[in-house]
Amino acid sequence: MSFPKTLLLGLKSEQFRHPLDLQATTALKQIPGVDLLVRNLLGALGEQYFYLENIASGVRVSEQQLPELHQLLVEAAKVLDVEAPQLYVRQHPVPNAYTFAMRGRQAFVVLHTSLIELLTPEETQAVIAHELGHLKCEHGVYLTLANLITLAVGQVPNWGTLVAQSLQAQMLEWLRCAEFSCDRAALLATQNPRTVMSVLMKLAGGSPTLSPQLNLDAFLEQARSYDDISDDALGEALKQLQTEQLSHPVPVLRAREIDRWASSQNYYDLLNPSKRCYSDKTNATGGWRNW
């Protein structure tokens, strides 16, 4: 770590989850049979398939293999008070990271090589912490369904249109809302809002050669310009049309949300031991429950 972090022992997801995530998750739970379908049918098959994929085509990170990445994982998990999942690195030209987690089974996180090459170590830790946020918030069942569909599209391109049409708008809305909570987890782990916002800027328009020239303050000003579009009905309608088929909120919006939350009383209280107030049900030793 570049500087000492506050360890958030006993941290509960309810203390940092974005309100939109809570609302969207509640709505998604009302869809009959989704939990049962993923857990009992897709879960076991998907877990075995992707485990074999990682073992066969990726590199498992450990103290002996890519130890610097392993240390970033261990540190982030310690700060967020979660058990560190397995971490794999896979060769891929598209910068990305994803998580697979089902209740009672070993969770794992995958990082693409192009993502690691794009980011600094601190920014890579922010991405890892973002994925840990999915585990902390127990997004597993719905995230697994989304990842299975997304990865199937990537591996069988001809299914792309069919899958995109069949993926319910409610699932996409949930995915976008869940990302806000995980960005907050990234901020809690790094405790540096500029690190998290820099990741989002690089994902929007960075490359290993362009990244040193990027200006974060200019990117935040760009985010404010995006907000200004909502001042009229047409602009708001166009924004809705632009984002309704996306699995993630647009990067400028995510950066703006982190910028705001980093200045909030909620964030300050979580980092200040004298201000943190956990319920009697909080397990002070930490631990976690994955899907």
Image: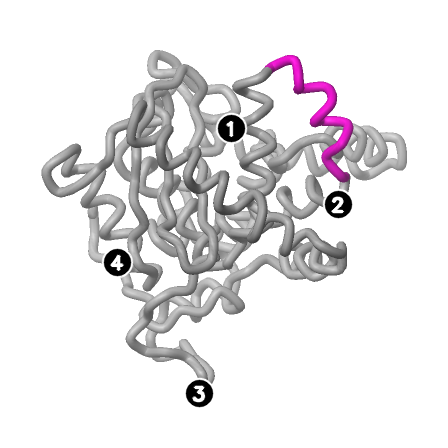
Could you tell which of marks 1 and 4 lies nearer the N-terminus?
4
**What amino acid type should be assigned to the residue bearing mark 4?**
Lys
Of 116 and 283, the residue lying toward us = 283
Residues packed near mark 1 inside 10 Å, few (<14), some (14 to 19) or many (20 plus): few
**What amino acid type should be assigned to the residue bearing mark 3?**
Asp
Mark 3 vs mark 4, foreground winner is 3
Residues packed near mark 3 inside 10 Å, few (<14), some (14 to 19) or many (20 plus): few
- Tell me the tag on residue 170: 2
- Tell me the tag on residue 110: none
**What amino acid type should be assigned to the residue bearing mark 2?**
Gln
Q: CA distance from mark 3 to mark 4?
A: 25 Å
At horizontal 83% and vertical 31% (from top left) the residue drawn is 235
Give the overall secondary structure of the magenta segment: helix
Range drawn in magenta: 157-168
Left or right placement of residue 212 versus residue 61 in this view: right
Q: Secondary structure at mark 1?
A: helix
Q: Is residue 112 above or below residue 144?
A: above
Q: CA distance from mark 1 to mark 4?
A: 28 Å
At horizontal 50% and vertical 57% (from top left) the residue drawn is 263
At horizontal 57% and vertical 52% (from top left) the residue drawn is 40
- Tell me the tag on residue 280: 3
Q: Give the image location of residue 129, x and y in percent.
A: 37, 48
Mark 2 vs mark 1, foreground winner is 2
Mark 1 vs mark 4, foreground winner is 4
- Tell me the tag on residue 218: 1
Q: Which residue is mark 4?
A: 5
Q: Secondary structure at mark 2?
A: helix
Q: Is residue 8 above or below residue 71?
A: below
